[in-house]
Amino acid sequence: MYPNARGLSSFPSLLDQLGGVAREFDSFLDPGRVVCTRRASFPLTVRAREDGYEIAAVVPGVKKDQLELTVDKKKLTIAIEPIEKAPQEDEIHGRYLLKEHAEVSGSRAVSFPDEIEESGIEATLSDGILKIFVRKAVEAQPKKIEIR
């Protein structure tokens, strides 16, 4: 075994990565999956319910007017546009000595396995959490059959 910078073998991390690839492959083969594409740096949580999907996006410091939600068939896209700052602002406040907070921008897309109701989408933004509820189309919801 060859030690890495932390004194551990790099072999376990390679196995972890291969395990991640295997999990991704397994999820690809699952026809009931919810697929998320990631192009930005804000995390998402998607939960399936019987009547629809709950989505939570962590977007600290983002204002409501920076967000744009679009829906197209079975796909919901969340886009964040950065706030344009006047160039004089940095001249007034001086140069940065440290700036660890980056402006979040970009988009994430969620594709659903079932048809959704475009008019049945609700969204709220509170305390840096964007909560979205996407209702399944009536024909996509499970139906209970009465037994006589």
Image (spheres, helix red, strand yellow):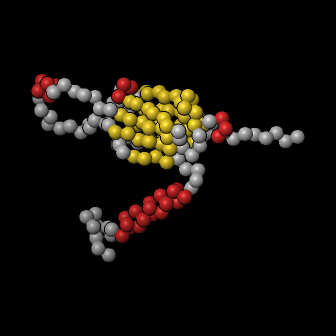
Residue located at (33% from left, 68% from top): 10
Find residue 146 and report its image quarter. top right
- Numbered-mark total: 0
Residue located at (41% from left, 41% from top): 108
Q: Quadrant of the C terminus?
A: top right
Indicate whether 17 appears above or below 39: below
**Front-most of residues 30 and 116:** 116
User: Farthest residue in the front direction?
Assistant: 73
Residue located at (19% from left, 25% from top): 86
Residue located at (48% from left, 32% from top): 131
Residue 106 % position (x, y):
34, 39
The answer to whether residue 87 is seen in the rendering is yes
Residue 69 % position (x, y):
44, 32
Find residue 104 and report its image quarter. top left
**Front-most of residues 137 and 128:** 137
User: Farthest residue in the right direction?
Assistant: 148
Q: Is residue 90 left or right of residue 14?
A: left
Find residue 78 and report its image quarter. top left
The answer to whether residue 93 is seen in the rendering is no
